[in-house]
Amino acid sequence: MRKATLIVIIIIILGAIGYRLHSRSTDSHQLAQQQALAQFAALPGYRLLKQQEPQLWQEVRESFLHSLAAGHSQQQAIGEVRGQLTELVNLRIVKADDRAVTDYIAVAVQEMQALNSVSAESCYRFLYPQVSGGVNIGTLLSAQMNQADQQALEQLFLHSLGSDRTRDIKAAHNALNEVVKRLYPHWGNQLQQLNQPEDLATDHQKLCVMSIDLYRTILKLPQPEAANLIRQMVVG
């Protein structure tokens, strides 16, 4: 009888120890997630997203936590949710001032170049997420490049709170003609591929390099002309 009682007591004690260890492990995991979320919410760009677009922030927040729960690193989780901002970024480009627009595109060009050095497919997926499903810049680009991306988001969100900027469609058309004129001696009729990124016959490597060349040439225009053209390109 005493032996049976002793066994029961030992089982109860072991069960209590296991519960405490599990509880501590769960608490530690939740604390780590909370700390990661706090750091994420304080990042440039995302801290303004939280203030300016609370509904979208909740969606991004849930995706971030879901990614962490799946065992992904914090940097990987940030890269995964970055694609959820694409539509908002396009809306804000139409509203932002000239400098915020051109600075954002300048960083995007650096990202294209860095991704192209990884692989042409990575660059292509970055350029055309609607066709290819996007890419995780958190895992493919350096920490410095990701920080530059976040700073560009910050400035774009900070300077795009008003109504849409007035677009001069004729001036945008003239600016595009000037850009094509500069690009044509090198690329010729291949430039038409920029309008057909989903074509299976398109050379993704060439398309990526042409896109980099296109945006770099646009950025060489006077800033007001470059920003006006970029806004018009976003609107279509």
Image (cartoon, helix red, strand yellow):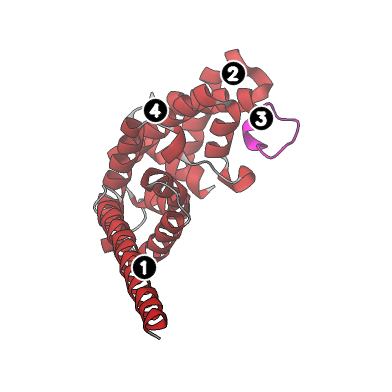
Q: Which residue is mark 3?
A: 192
Task: Classify 31 as above or below 149.
Answer: below
Q: Is residue 162 in sight in this rendering?
A: no
**Number of the front mark, 1 or 4:** 1
Q: Which residue is mark 2?
A: 184
Measure the C-alpha gap from mark 1 to mark 4: 62 Å
- State which tag comes first along the sequence, 1 or 4: 1
Measure the C-alpha gap from mark 4 to mark 3: 20 Å
**Number of the front mark, 3 or 1:** 1
Measure the C-alpha gap from mark 2 to mark 1: 71 Å
Measure the C-alpha gap from mark 3 to mark 1: 66 Å
SS category of the residue bearing label 2: helix
Q: Is residue 186 left or right of residue 45?
A: right
200 drawn magenta: yes
The structure residue drawn at horizontal position 40% and vertical position 46%, both measured from the top left corner, is 73
For the view shown, which residue lies furthest in the right direction? 201
Q: Which residue is mark 1?
A: 18
